[in-house]
Amino acid sequence: MEKSLGNPAVVGLAGFGGTTLLLQFHNLGLCGAGPVLWCALFFGGLMQLIAGLQEFSTGNNFGFSVFSTYGAFWMSLGGLLLGTHYGILNTTTSDIGWFLVMFTAITLIFFIGSMKQNWMLAFTFITLLIGFIFLDISHLGGPAIFTKVAAVDLIICALSAWYLMAHGIFAQFGWELPTGKPWIR
């Protein structure tokens, strides 16, 4: 009898959604940077990196790439915050903007791939892509209001990631949350 494996995407989606949500609460002025930093390093960072490595062992190249990439994103962002706070590196708003632009480009590629999977996953990636674009604009000289607009969009993104997480958890018990058909067949 073959032993079934757990679904590492559930853990990755929990870390992604939770850390994204907390950062947006910070961007809206509802919480400080401390909880964001520690969630970025461990919940969004390390947890997603582990989920990505577990996705590799299941043969899921998309999950491996996505969770490993965003795990590294959160750990890098946490490192930038720590370095800035302790004066290790002089990181400007523009530096953060270009950091975000790189992940915007990667997110575009992931979004295209997500459109072949299911509606909810593609929706999660399009909201992530839009959020990154608004953050790019605000950090590269655009109006600061774009950070607030991005925060609202990314709260929707985080909640949609948690919906996918719930889908993965509930499926274990035979409950199916609908995720919709792929955007591209």
Image: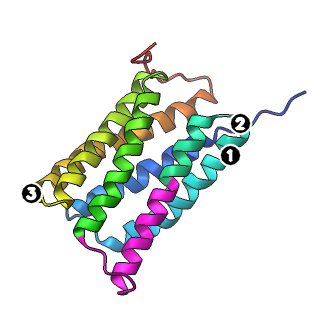
User: Which residues are drawn in magenta?
Assistant: 71-92
User: Residue beneath label 1, please?
Assistant: 54
Residue 73 is covered by the magenta coloring:
yes
**Residue 177 vs residue 168: left or right?**
left
The vertical placement of 75 against 136, above or below, is: below
Does the CB distance between marks 1 and 2 fall below 8 Å? yes
User: How far apart are labels 1 and 2 at the CA level?
Assistant: 7 Å
In-front residue for pair 34/113 = 113
Amino acid type, label 1: Gln
Q: Locate the N terminus and report the quarter of the image it occupies.
A: top right
The vertical placement of 173 against 17, above or below, is: above
User: Residue beneath label 2, please?
Assistant: 58
Amino acid type, label 3: Pro
**Residue 77 vs residue 2: left or right?**
left
Few, some or many residues within 10 Å of mark 3 (<14, 14–19, 20+) = few
**Element marked by disc 3:** loop
Residue 52 percent location from the top left of the image: 61, 47
